[in-house]
Protein backbone atom coordinates (compact mmCIF):
# COMPACT_ATOMS: atom_id res chain seq x y z
CA UNK A 1 0.00 0.00 0.00
CA UNK A 2 1.33 3.43 -0.90
CA UNK A 3 1.11 6.65 1.09
CA UNK A 4 -1.49 8.01 -1.33
CA UNK A 5 -3.70 4.90 -1.05
CA UNK A 6 -3.49 4.98 2.74
CA UNK A 7 -4.40 8.68 2.94
CA UNK A 8 -7.32 8.24 0.58
CA UNK A 9 -8.75 5.33 2.58
CA UNK A 10 -8.03 6.83 6.00
CA UNK A 11 -9.82 10.08 5.17
CA UNK A 12 -12.78 8.43 3.44
CA UNK A 13 -13.64 5.90 6.13
CA UNK A 14 -15.81 6.78 9.11
CA UNK A 15 -14.03 6.04 12.36
CA UNK A 16 -15.84 3.34 14.30
CA UNK A 17 -15.25 1.72 17.66
CA UNK A 18 -14.53 -1.98 18.03
CA UNK A 19 -16.79 -4.07 20.25
CA UNK A 20 -14.07 -4.18 22.92
CA UNK A 21 -13.68 -0.39 22.82
CA UNK A 22 -17.44 0.06 23.17
CA UNK A 23 -17.45 -2.22 26.22
CA UNK A 24 -14.47 -0.55 27.91
CA UNK A 25 -15.58 3.00 27.14
CA UNK A 26 -18.98 2.20 28.67
CA UNK A 27 -17.27 1.45 32.00
CA UNK A 28 -15.89 4.81 33.15
CA UNK A 29 -13.01 4.54 35.58
CA UNK A 30 -9.84 6.36 36.54
CA UNK A 31 -7.31 5.68 33.81
CA UNK A 32 -3.81 6.99 33.19
CA UNK A 33 -4.02 9.12 30.04
CA UNK A 34 -1.38 8.41 27.41
CA UNK A 35 -0.79 8.75 23.68
CA UNK A 36 1.24 6.97 21.04
CA UNK A 37 2.39 8.06 17.60
CA UNK A 38 1.68 5.67 14.74
CA UNK A 39 4.53 6.75 12.46
CA UNK A 40 4.09 5.87 8.78
CA UNK A 41 6.57 6.53 6.00
CA UNK A 42 7.06 5.39 2.43
CA UNK A 43 9.99 3.27 1.34
CA UNK A 44 10.19 1.75 -2.17
CA UNK A 45 6.53 2.72 -2.80
CA UNK A 46 5.42 0.74 0.26
CA UNK A 47 4.04 2.30 3.41
CA UNK A 48 6.01 1.28 6.51
CA UNK A 49 5.03 1.39 10.20
CA UNK A 50 7.70 2.43 12.69
CA UNK A 51 7.86 0.30 15.84
CA UNK A 52 10.22 0.13 18.79
CA UNK A 53 11.30 -2.49 21.28
CA UNK A 54 11.10 -1.10 24.80
CA UNK A 55 14.23 -1.21 26.95
CA UNK A 56 14.48 -4.25 29.24
CA UNK A 57 14.98 -2.22 32.44
CA UNK A 58 11.68 -0.30 32.16
CA UNK A 59 9.07 -0.78 34.89
CA UNK A 60 6.11 -1.07 32.50
CA UNK A 61 6.14 -3.59 29.62
CA UNK A 62 9.95 -4.13 29.36
CA UNK A 63 11.13 -5.58 26.05
CA UNK A 64 7.72 -5.33 24.40
CA UNK A 65 7.08 -4.00 20.91
CA UNK A 66 5.39 -0.62 20.98
CA UNK A 67 4.82 2.69 19.25
CA UNK A 68 6.70 5.76 20.47
CA UNK A 69 4.54 7.24 23.21
CA UNK A 70 3.84 7.61 26.88
CA UNK A 71 1.89 9.31 29.64
CA UNK A 72 0.28 12.72 29.19
CA UNK A 73 2.27 15.35 31.09
CA UNK A 74 0.88 18.58 32.57
CA UNK A 75 2.71 20.69 29.96
CA UNK A 76 1.25 18.78 26.98
CA UNK A 77 -1.38 20.78 25.10
CA UNK A 78 -3.26 17.67 23.97
CA UNK A 79 -2.74 14.01 23.02
CA UNK A 80 -1.03 15.02 19.77
CA UNK A 81 1.45 17.06 21.79
CA UNK A 82 2.10 14.06 24.05
CA UNK A 83 2.65 11.70 21.12
CA UNK A 84 5.02 14.12 19.34
CA UNK A 85 6.98 14.88 22.52
CA UNK A 86 7.42 11.20 23.33
CA UNK A 87 8.43 10.36 19.74
CA UNK A 88 11.07 13.09 19.91
CA UNK A 89 12.39 11.82 23.25
CA UNK A 90 12.41 8.12 22.28
CA UNK A 91 13.47 8.08 18.62
CA UNK A 92 14.54 11.66 17.82
CA UNK A 93 11.60 12.41 15.54
CA UNK A 94 11.02 16.13 14.94
CA UNK A 95 7.43 17.43 14.98
CA UNK A 96 8.12 19.36 11.76
CA UNK A 97 8.83 16.08 9.94
CA UNK A 98 5.31 14.78 10.70
CA UNK A 99 2.00 15.39 9.00
CA UNK A 100 -0.68 14.53 11.56
CA UNK A 101 -3.60 13.00 9.68
CA UNK A 102 -5.87 12.00 12.55
CA UNK A 103 -6.49 9.96 15.67
CA UNK A 104 -8.10 6.64 16.42
CA UNK A 105 -10.49 6.09 19.31
CA UNK A 106 -8.71 5.65 22.66
CA UNK A 107 -7.73 2.12 23.53
CA UNK A 108 -8.07 1.07 27.16
CA UNK A 109 -5.67 -1.49 28.56
CA UNK A 110 -6.38 -3.95 31.33
CA UNK A 111 -3.44 -2.39 33.21
CA UNK A 112 -5.32 0.92 33.58
CA UNK A 113 -4.11 3.07 30.69
CA UNK A 114 -6.17 4.96 28.12
CA UNK A 115 -4.04 5.19 24.97
CA UNK A 116 -4.94 7.69 22.25
CA UNK A 117 -3.31 6.64 18.95
CA UNK A 118 -2.22 9.62 16.81
CA UNK A 119 -1.57 8.82 13.14
CA UNK A 120 1.27 10.66 11.37
CA UNK A 121 2.86 10.35 7.96
CA UNK A 122 6.47 11.48 7.61
CA UNK A 123 7.24 13.98 4.88
CA UNK A 124 10.62 12.37 4.19
CA UNK A 125 12.44 9.27 5.41
CA UNK A 126 13.99 10.52 8.65
CA UNK A 127 17.05 9.60 10.63
CA UNK A 128 16.12 8.12 13.98
CA UNK A 129 18.11 8.37 17.21
CA UNK A 130 17.46 5.90 20.00
CA UNK A 131 17.16 7.01 23.61
CA UNK A 132 18.61 3.86 25.18
CA UNK A 133 16.94 4.68 28.50
CA UNK A 134 13.59 3.92 26.86
CA UNK A 135 14.19 2.06 23.59
CA UNK A 136 16.46 -0.86 22.73
CA UNK A 137 15.63 -1.11 19.01
CA UNK A 138 13.80 0.67 16.16
CA UNK A 139 12.45 -1.28 13.20
CA UNK A 140 9.68 -1.00 10.62
CA UNK A 141 7.09 -3.32 9.15
CA UNK A 142 5.23 -2.93 5.83
CA UNK A 143 1.72 -1.71 6.66
CA UNK A 144 0.39 -4.28 4.18
CA UNK A 145 1.42 -6.99 6.65
CA UNK A 146 -1.23 -5.80 9.11
CA UNK A 147 -3.98 -5.82 6.47
CA UNK A 148 -3.76 -9.61 6.10
CA UNK A 149 -6.15 -11.13 8.61
CA UNK A 150 -4.36 -14.50 8.29
CA UNK A 151 -1.46 -12.86 10.13
CA UNK A 152 -3.70 -11.83 13.06
CA UNK A 153 -4.21 -14.07 16.09
CA UNK A 154 -6.10 -13.51 19.29
CA UNK A 155 -6.69 -15.41 22.51
CA UNK A 156 -9.04 -14.89 25.44
CA UNK A 157 -7.23 -14.08 28.69
CA UNK A 158 -8.79 -14.03 32.15
CA UNK A 159 -7.87 -11.05 34.30
CA UNK A 160 -9.24 -9.59 37.52
CA UNK A 161 -11.15 -7.10 35.31
CA UNK A 162 -12.79 -9.90 33.31
CA UNK A 163 -12.07 -11.82 30.10
CA UNK A 164 -10.18 -9.92 27.43
CA UNK A 165 -9.14 -10.62 23.87
CA UNK A 166 -5.36 -10.26 23.39
CA UNK A 167 -4.15 -9.68 19.83
CA UNK A 168 -0.94 -11.04 18.28
CA UNK A 169 0.57 -10.03 14.92
CA UNK A 170 3.98 -11.69 14.61
CA UNK A 171 6.42 -10.35 12.03
CA UNK A 172 9.73 -12.13 11.37
CA UNK A 173 11.36 -12.48 14.81
CA UNK A 174 9.12 -9.82 16.40
CA UNK A 175 6.13 -10.74 18.56
CA UNK A 176 3.80 -7.75 18.20
CA UNK A 177 1.01 -8.20 20.73
CA UNK A 178 -1.21 -6.56 23.31
CA UNK A 179 -2.20 -2.91 22.95
CA UNK A 180 0.17 -2.35 20.02
CA UNK A 181 -1.37 -5.22 18.04
CA UNK A 182 -4.89 -4.15 19.02
CA UNK A 183 -4.25 -0.59 17.80
CA UNK A 184 -2.77 -1.91 14.53
CA UNK A 185 -5.83 -4.12 14.18
CA UNK A 186 -8.11 -1.10 14.68
CA UNK A 187 -6.15 0.89 12.10
CA UNK A 188 -6.21 -1.94 9.56
CA UNK A 189 -9.97 -2.45 10.08
CA UNK A 190 -10.48 1.30 9.57
CA UNK A 191 -8.55 1.17 6.28
CA UNK A 192 -10.23 -2.06 5.10
CA UNK A 193 -13.72 -0.71 5.85
CA UNK A 194 -13.31 1.86 3.08
CA UNK A 195 -14.88 0.90 -0.18
CA UNK A 196 -12.73 2.07 -3.08
Image: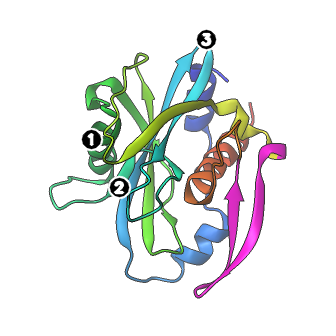
Label 2 vs 3, first from the N-terminus? 3
Q: Residue at x 60, y 29 (%)?
A: 6
| Residue identified by numbered label 3 | 44
Quadrant of the image containing the C terminus: top right
The region drawn magenta spans 150-169
Whether tag 2 and tag 1 are in contact, CB under 8 A, the answer is yes
Question: Which residue is nearer to you in this view: 190 or 62?
Answer: 62
User: Could you tell me how far apart the alpha carbons at marks 2 and 3 are, in whole angstroms?
Assistant: 30 Å
Quadrant of residue 121 within the rendered picture? top left
The extreme right residue here reads 150
On whether residue 109 falls in the magenta region, the answer is: no
Q: Residues within 10 Å of mark 3 (few under 14, many from 20)?
A: few
Whether tag 3 and tag 1 are in contact, CB under 8 A, the answer is no
| Residue identified by numbered label 1 | 89
Question: Which residue is nearer to you in this view: 87 or 97?
Answer: 87
Q: Residue at x 70, y 75 (%)?
A: 157
With respect to residue 72, does 130 lie above or below?
A: above
Whether tag 2 and tag 3 are in contact, CB under 8 A, the answer is no
Q: Position of residue 141 (x, y in %)?
A: 61, 32
The extreme front residue here reads 57
Q: Position of residue 38 (x, y in %)?
A: 48, 41
Amino acid sequence: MTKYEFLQRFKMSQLSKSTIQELLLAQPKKLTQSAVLIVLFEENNQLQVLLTRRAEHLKHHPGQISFPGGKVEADDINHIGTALREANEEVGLQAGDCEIIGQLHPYQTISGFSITPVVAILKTTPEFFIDENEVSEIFHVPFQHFLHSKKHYSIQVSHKTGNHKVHFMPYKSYNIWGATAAILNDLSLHIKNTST
